[in-house]
Amino acid sequence: MPYRYFQVLAATILLFGLAACEAEVEGDEPGECSDGVDNDQDGALDCGDDGCSIATDCVGDDDDVADDDDAATDDDDTTPDDDDMTSDDDDTTSDDDDTTSDDDDTVADDDDTVADDDDSGADDDDATGAPFVEVVTGIWHSCALRSDGNVECWGSNDEGQTSVPAASFVTIASGQQHTLGLDSSGVLYEWGYNLAGPSMPQTGNYAAVGGGHWNSCVLSDAGSVSCWGSENTDVNDAPTDVFTEVSVGNTHVCGVTSVGTGVCWPGDDAGAQLPVAAYDSISAGSYFSCAVLVGGTVDCWGENDFGQATAPPTGTYSQVSAGHYHSCAVRDTDQSIACWGQNADGQAAAPSGTFAQVSAGGWHTCAITSGGTVECWGQNTEGQASPPAR
């Protein structure tokens, strides 16, 4: 071939070689492997381009590697050390204000938590129910009134005596197998045994109510007493005195008049033979009665087969309850309870503690603690001594 031909061919090859050498390559300029731009327009960019495979931005100690702020281990967007991670991030589980353990909305420390919240089970009255303020006992059942007007009953329900009607109550009373209550308007409710008529509804508005063996009585706003029931119809013949309270026993009724005297009927019942004294309150039991006199001492009278009508331990008391064959009273000095009389089932073995009110039943006793709970002791054959939790 002519020499000129070889000159032209060599020049062409040289030009193409120079062009190839000058083609854009990702990473041939500083920063191209981390600028987010496809500089050589080959469809791959930064560390994903072959031209950046050995760039310092993609291996070693660059910002996109193990020690880089964008790396897997130390980056602000990483899992172990990042402010957005699980263990150290403000949005994490353990240290975040929105976490389980330290957040104001957490279970352990939140004001809305179970353990520390005012709405919690441990500290809030509404968590497990309002405090109890009154308890009454029958022979085999018991009932208690909460401060919000709800009543809970437990024990035997063979006559419906623990099936509380729907109402908001202000006071309650218990007979042998029936229960009574007054709502905030003074309306009377009765539930339980009614075979012989002790739970006959009485119309009217009342201030107090009492339940006995087979009879019941109510005290009107004007101070008159009305009674009904059977077995001993003389119990229903209430005197015309003006009363401030009424208590119904097995076969007799007692009350305190507006002038502080005590009155019991019928007069031939052993529990109705009360001494002359100034009375603060009276409790009628089975054939005996006990009273808190003005000044705080307790006196009892009537049948005394088990020592139930024997004078209690010395001291002053705020309230007394006469049961079937035992009695209990709350001391006004330290709010402890003293019991006396029959104790075959432990009904007179009062626990230690401070109490606001006590009720002596058949062979068990229940009381309201100073903390608003109910505590019972004695016979528990029907669950009558197993009160609900607060």
Image (cartoon, rainbow, N blue to C red):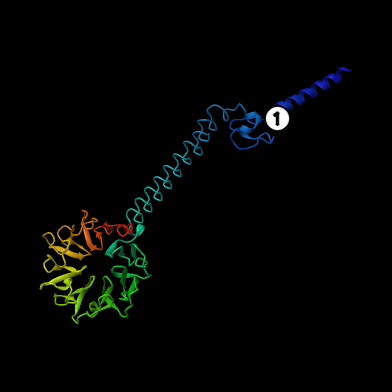
Pick out the residue farthest to the bottom: 240
* Res 300 → quadrant: bottom left
Q: Position of residue 20 (x, y in %)?
A: 73, 27
Q: Is residue 383 left or right of residue 97?
A: left
Q: Is residue 15 left or right of residue 230?
A: right
Q: Which amino acid, mark 1? A: Ala
Q: Position of residue 250 (x, y in %)?
A: 24, 70
**Residue named by callout 1:** 23
Classify mark 1: residues with Cα within 10 Å, few (<14), some (14-19) or many (20+). Answer: few
Residue under the point 36% across and 71% down? 167
| Quadrant position of the N terminus in the picture | top right
Q: How many marks?
A: 1
Asked if 370 appears above or below 38 in the picture, the reply is below
The secondary structure type at the circle numbered 1 is: loop
Pick out the residue farthest to the right: 1
Q: Position of residue 303 (x, y in %)?
A: 16, 67
Asked if 138 appears above or below 243 in the picture, the reply is above
Asked if 310 appears above or below 235 in the picture, the reply is above
Residue toward you, 334 or 365: 365
Q: Is residue 93 visible?
A: yes
Residue under the point 51% across and 32% down? 68
Q: Is residue 220 visible?
A: no
Residue toward you, 98 or 78: 98
Q: Position of residue 80 (x, y in %)?
A: 48, 36
| Quadrant position of the C terminus in the picture | bottom left
* Res 52 → quadrant: top right
Residue toward you, 156 or 108: 156
